[in-house]
Image (tube, helix red, strand yellow):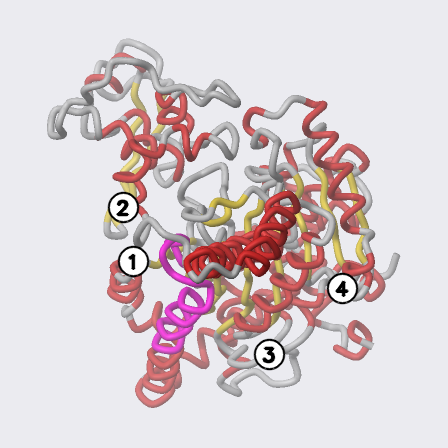
């Protein structure tokens, strides 16, 4: 089959568009296909227009496009644990390791604001993190009591509290 | 193997059992993403990392807390044939991506197939619970219990501010994706579907075809799911989705009522023709299969077709997929042969009584 536009080269690109139920088929050569802008408005969206990672990396790259304030730091942000750069992340749409979240937090937060509902997790907490939070709360309370005990010159009580705090701190590490 | 035996062996809990609102809601599914602390995400994982993660998960799947929740089996992708992996995809137990992870991927499966855990897909763990009918809360409870049980032995990557950390920031926080598979022929026939889908996407939910992102919707089947995972609790996410799903159900019921009142004869003609075609045709492609099954299921729900189980749609939409067909006929089939065999399987199944299959 020859390209239906130039009638010279063989048609290698076959596209079927369905818009509002109206089906249109195109059979073009590669050269004409590239020139026919409206057949593929964006070559990256060809094939799977809803590939989420592609949409996401589009969203990420918007940050550095002209409509947005230029990114001031020219230094490549890199995750110290896995070595992934922010640029690599914008290309694949996925992080390399859990530490990337802290490494890229400054640039991640505007993105999270766009795609999520806020920046703070309010759901389920793992058992171990729950324990950690409990220990932290208990420590805070003991330190307050210690200050009070010192202020009231109850040194025996203060020594007891100090030992308790030490024990908890060691346990937490 | 007889067809009855094959059906018995192949169908999962979600395909044969019933549930609330299951004239419209086929399944409720909860998937939670979890990652292990101290390992790169699967994107960057070497084979050694992947092996270590698989070993940790295998051990966790055997811990006492997991034993309380049912019989789980750990299966490495490399120990499954490509055909078996594809069959798991067709049964919605694993994703097409995991099926590709021959070397690094694994799967933990509960014997009723209501719970499956994908290992080393996009995240280290994807815990999934799939139940028939509208049972999101129950599915969440089950998935969350499995999550707690695994955590007895595993340490998750968790951040005090961002919550559960995931490879893609679209899943961070709760890591939850709640989705409901709906059959909406009434809205499709009365033309209300496009308006509804637009409205749904405007309230922060996603609508997809049944085979995930970017797939077309055949057979009037749609998956509605949450998009946001951070800043809302699991309960809020499920409640939001539930309230939208309830509204869609109501609209679908109204549409069906309207069709019965105003276009009864056309509707009866349509569903009966489709039934006739399924019962007698000699060639069926998968797209037509889903369309005809959708009509027949509507006919069953509205009492036009009697004596056929309503689970026929869920059952046949899976059993007529390419890998299932090849498994049943026990050989590789070209697309042309598949169309012939598919028609044969459907004819045979429609002539069987449900007691033969569901015992």
Residue hosting label 2? A113
The chain to which mark 4 is attached is B
| Residue placed most toward the observer, B320 or B34 | B34
Front residue of A84 and A93: A84
- As helix, strand or loop, the secondary structure at mark 2 comes to helix
Residue ID for mark 3: B19
Chain of the residue where label 2 is placed in the rendered structure? A
Q: CA distance from mark 1 to mark 3?
A: 26 Å
Would residue B229 be counted in the magenta stretch?
yes
Picture disc at residue B201:
1
Q: Chain of mark 1?
A: B
Q: Give the residue drawn at x 29%, y 13%.
A: A75
Q: Which of these two is toward me, B207 or B109?
A: B109
Percent position (x, y) of residue B54? 73, 37
Label 1 element class:
helix
Q: Which residues make up the magenta segment?
A: B226-248
Q: State the separation of the CA atoms marked 2 and 1.
A: 18 Å
């Amino acid at each position: 089959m020859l390209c239906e536009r130039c009638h010279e080269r063989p048609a290698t690109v076959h596209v079927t568009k369905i818009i509002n139920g109206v089906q249109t088929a195109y059979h073009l050569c590669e050269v004409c296909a590239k020139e026919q802008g409206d057949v593929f408005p964006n070559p990256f969206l060809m094939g799977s227009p809803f590939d989420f990672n592609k949409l996401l990396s589009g969203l990420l790259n918007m940050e550095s496009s002209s409509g947005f304030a230029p990114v001031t730091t020219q230094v490549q942000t890199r995750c110290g644990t896995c070595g992934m750069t922010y640029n690599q992340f914008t290309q694949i749409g996925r992080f390399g390791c859990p530490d990337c979240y802290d490494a890229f937090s400054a640039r991640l937060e505007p993105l999270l604001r766009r795609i999520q509902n806020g920046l703070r997790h309010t759901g389920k907490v793992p058992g171990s993190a729950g324990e950690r939070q409990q220990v932290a709360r208990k420590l805070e309370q003991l330190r307050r009591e210690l200050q009070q005990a010192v202020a009231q010159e109850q040194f025996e009580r203060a020594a007891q509290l100090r030992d308790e705090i030490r024990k908890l701190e060691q346990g937490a590490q | 193997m007889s067809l009855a035996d094959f059906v018995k062996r192949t169908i999962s809990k979600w395909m044969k059992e019933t549930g609330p609102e299951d004239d419209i809601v086929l399944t409720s599914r909860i998937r939670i993403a979890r990652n292990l602390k101290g390992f790169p995400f699967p994107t960057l994982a070497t084979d050694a990392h992947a092996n270590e993660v698989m070993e940790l998960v295998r051990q966790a799947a055997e811990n006492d807390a997991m034993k309380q929740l049912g019989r789980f089996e750990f299966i490495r992708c490399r120990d499954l044939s490509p055909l078996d992996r594809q069959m798991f995809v067709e049964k919605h137990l694993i994703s097409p991506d995991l099926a590709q992870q021959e070397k690094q991927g694994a799967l933990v499966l509960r014997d009723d197939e209501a719970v499956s855990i994908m290992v080393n897909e996009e995240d280290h763990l994807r815990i999934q619970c799939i139940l028939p009918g509208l049972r999101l809360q129950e599915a969440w409870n089950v998935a969350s219990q499995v999550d707690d049980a695994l955590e007895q032995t595993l340490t998750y990557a968790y951040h005090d501010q961002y919550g559960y950390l995931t490879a893609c920031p679209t899943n961070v926080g709760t890591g939850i994706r709640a989705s409901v598979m709906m059959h909406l022929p009434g809205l499709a026939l009365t033309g209300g579907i496009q308006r509804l889908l637009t409205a749904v996407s405007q309230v922060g939910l996603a609508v997809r075809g049944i085979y995930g992102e970017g797939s077309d919707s055949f057979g009037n089947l749609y998956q509605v799911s949450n998009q946001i995972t951070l800043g809302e609790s699991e309960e809020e996410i499920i409640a939001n989705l539930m309230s939208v799903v309830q509204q869609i159900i109501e609209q679908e019921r109204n549409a069906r009522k309207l069709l019965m009142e105003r276009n009864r004869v056309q509707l009866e003609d349509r569903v009966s023709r489709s039934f006739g075609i399924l019962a007698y045709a000699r060639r069926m492609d998968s797209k037509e299969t889903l369309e005809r099954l959708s009509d027949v299921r509507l006919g069953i729900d509205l009492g036009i077709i009697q004596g056929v189980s309503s689970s026929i749609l869920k059952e046949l939409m899976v059993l007529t997929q390419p890998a299932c067909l090849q498994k049943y006929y026990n050989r590789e089939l070209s697309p042309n042969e598949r169309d012939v065999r598919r028609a044969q399987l459907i004819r045979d199944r429609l002539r069987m009584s449900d007691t033969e299959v569901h015992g």
